[in-house]
Image: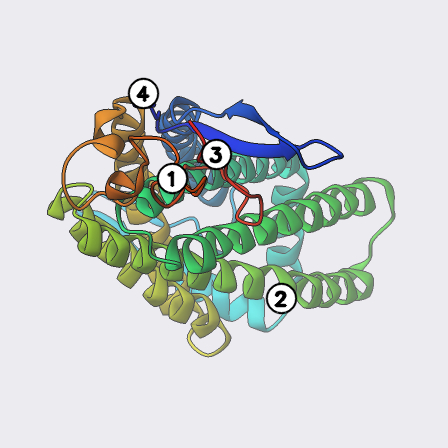
Amino acid sequence: SSPTFQSNVLLRTTQDPDNMGAGIQVSTRPYWWGGMASVLGGLLFFLACLLNLAFLSGTAFKVKNPLVAFERTKTGIDATAQAAAYKKYLALDEDLLRQLWEYRAVSANLSIVASAITTLSFFLLLATVMSLADCFDQHSGHKASKTMLVPAFLFAAALVVLDLTFNAGQTTTSAFIYDMWTVDYQTLKALEISYVMTNSREMWMKAVVWVFLGVGMSTAAYLNGRSNMLYSSWTFLSVLIALLSFIGFLAEVGRLKWFLEAAALDIALAVLVSFFLLPIWMVWTGVYLLNIRDKEFTEGPGIRGVNEIPVHGPQGNGTPGGAPYRAPYRDDDAPVNTHV
């Protein structure tokens, strides 16, 4: 009889001690969880971007961030005030430093919440990519789905988690020091220098996150180009996000040389990617994962594994009639029972 193979079923063999027979253990891990994670992650990226913008602009607080709050005029946004504030910052002006630290103290909770939502968004992005990698694996069988796609997003998510822990510790401790300790001007300058040195770690982690995001999106675009699993416009969107991610890396590290220009570019890229492109990409991918049907993986020419399914059982000499079917979420080293 012909077996029915589903796209989300893993067949593994557990042999008895005497190696006289084999039993089949079925493990079901569907694609819809990746689809739900993708849609929810896209919404969380959107929310995290809004919170980060509120934190940077200081619109949610009476005390403003003197380094990024622009002076609004009737004709638009004038960055002259910010440039003047940055010059004062380089000179370690006491009034500006006190205003900056007052802002950091009152905005500490918002900063942590924004970082936490960003971390959760990347976790859901990783869940999406794991499901997507299985789909690519079934359509094309290319090793890049497991050797490049998943590791790239895995490392990005891991760095975001580290950034959350570092940012939470730095933010809460800084707020505690400024609120509870008596800080004179000399102490304030030493505190700011220490803060900048510690915060430099966060800058490089964010830069590397941009790199891994670009590598992951490039791999996704490449795999979809080989398999034609999703629309070509999805490939174009992935390539666009990848290019902007690599530019984001340059903007992040460019702060060391051209702070104002690089910071403005970095913020613009973060808004474009996190507020628009990445949520669209995740919702689009989520809708695809939620609507996968078994026939997409078990019917039609060119789908990996279709021509390998044994439809007549074992041959007369006891050997299988075909190669084993390789389902998603499989254990590559586990033997597959082909006796039907």
Q: Which residue is mark 3?
A: 124
Front residue of this view, candidates 240 and 276? 240
- The residue tagged with tag 4: helix, strand or loop? loop
Q: Is residue 266 visible?
A: no
Q: Position of residue 240 (x, y in %)?
A: 22, 56
Mark 2 lies on a secondary structure that is helix
Out of 76 and 252, give the one closest to the viewer: 252
Which residue type does callout 4 highlight?
Ser
- Sequence order check, earlier mark of 4 and 2: 4
Q: In the picture, residue 331 is in which quadrant?
A: top right
Question: Which residue is at a point 26% across and 36% down the rendered structure image?
Answer: 280
Which residue is disc 4 drawn over?
Answer: 1
Q: Of the residues shown, which amino acid type is indicated by label 1?
A: Tyr
Q: CA distance from mark 4 to mark 1?
A: 16 Å
- Label 3 close to label 4 by CB (< 8 Å): no
Disc 1 packing (10 Å; few <14; some 14–19; many ≥20): some
The residue mark sitting in front, 4 or 2, is 4
Q: Residues within 10 Å of mark 4 (few under 14, many from 20)?
A: few
Q: How many marks?
A: 4
Which part of the image, by quadrant, shows the N terminus? top left
SS under mark 3 = helix
Q: CA distance from mark 4 to mark 2?
A: 64 Å
Q: Position of residue 15 (x, y in %)?
A: 66, 34
Q: Which residue is mark 2?
A: 200
- Which of the two marks, 3 or 4, is nearer to us in this view? 4
